[in-house]
Amino acid sequence: MNPFASDVDGIKQLAASYQQLRTEIRKVIVGQDEVVKYVLLSIFCDSHSLLVGVPGLAKTLLVKTVADVLQLDFKRIQFTPDLMPSDIIGAEVLNENRQFQFNKGPLFANIILADEINRTPPKTQSALLEAMQERQVTAAGVQHQLALPFFVLATQNPIEQEGTYPLPEAQLDRFMFNIVLDYPSLEEELQVVKSTTNDAPVSVQKVIGKEEIIAFQHLVRRIPIADNVVEYAVKLVASTRPNTASAAKVVDEFVAWGAGPRASQALVIAAKGHAAIHGKFSPDIEDVKAVALPILRHRIIRNFKAEAEGMSMEKIIAQLL
């Protein structure tokens, strides 16, 4: 059942809710406007995001604040090398009646902060992968459905790489956005220090809840999109694949592997969401370009020549655009 009088009204509500969310989040998070935009966009697109940044840039605080303004159940999992699948999905235990009973793990929440996700072995990462893709977990051969909405917002530290397990491409592909957090400006850092070193409490108000989020997710998928915009998104992804007829010159020179079809799907869905949060009733090519960098950044693998010559992923994608 469509909860909106019409999809046009729904888009207007989504754009208004997005602005309210930004206002509430700014009470706690200083700056990082692009990061906040992509995190909220991934939620409205029913997808997951990977947050990459050095320690101390408020990644955890951002995710906790988003959960508060959406009034969603929030769990934080600190990934470590000794973490087992049962530690996150739960396990069968013997109860007082000597019968096995499934005890749910921290994965049973609406928003999961997977902190330093690359610090855990592949066995545990694969358990998380099932939850991300299928919205379910399997324990002792029994499938358990996760409550909707369900999002994984994972963090990675790009500096400290000792004792880490790089995420496999299949898992990276499940994240719609790879969001890079940079250092704040001098003015922003001054504001952060002033606001966090006093005793004034900061609280945020709930803006929307579970039902509204799920309704907005269905609305985003119903948004019409012109064939030429879809074609642009697909051709953009095809141009990232080296040694093919569609490959761009910079790709043949600096890229080892290009993005797969899931990137094309992500570009179209994200472009629809990007148009909606700005009050537009249909996305155009500019919306595709606006979401291209965080979608393609982790789906393209540079070759040795690119690394040797300092050709960053951002430079390659900029040339493709």
Image (spheres, rainbow, N blue to C red):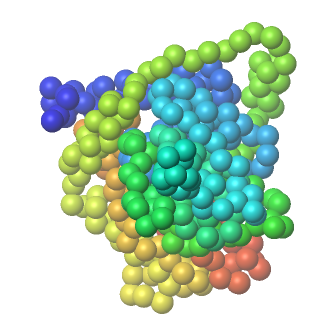
Q: Is residue 318 left or right of residue 84?
A: left
Q: Is residue 308 above or below residue 62?
A: below
Residue found 56% across the figure and 53% down from its top: 93
Q: Is residue 320 above or below residue 128?
A: below
Residue found 41% across the figure and 62% down from its top: 142
Q: Nearer the viewer, residue 98 or 23?
A: 98
Residue found 42% across the figure and 70% down from its top: 237
Residue found farthest to the bottom: 243
Q: Nearer the viewer, residue 80 or 313?
A: 80
Measured as percent of width and height from the top left, residue 127 is found at: 54, 63
Q: Is residue 105 above or below residue 4?
A: below
Measured as percent of width and height from the top left, residue 286 is found at: 39, 50
Q: Nearer the viewer, residue 104 or 205?
A: 104
Q: Nearer the viewer, residue 273 or 240?
A: 273
Residue found 65% across the figure and 82% down from its top: 303
Measured as percent of width and height from the top left, residue 306 is found at: 69, 78
How many tags in the picture?
Answer: 0
* Among the 4 quarters of the image, the one containing residue 211: top left
Query: Quadrant where the N terminus lies?
Result: top left
* Among the 4 quarters of the image, the one containing residue 210: top left
Q: Is residue 234 left or right of residue 114?
A: left
Q: Is residue 294 visible?
A: no
Q: Is residue 29 visible?
A: yes
Residue found farthest to the top: 200
Q: Is residue 304 above or below residue 50?
A: below
* Among the 4 quarters of the image, the one containing residue 297: bottom right
Measured as percent of width and height from the top left, residue 289 is found at: 44, 54
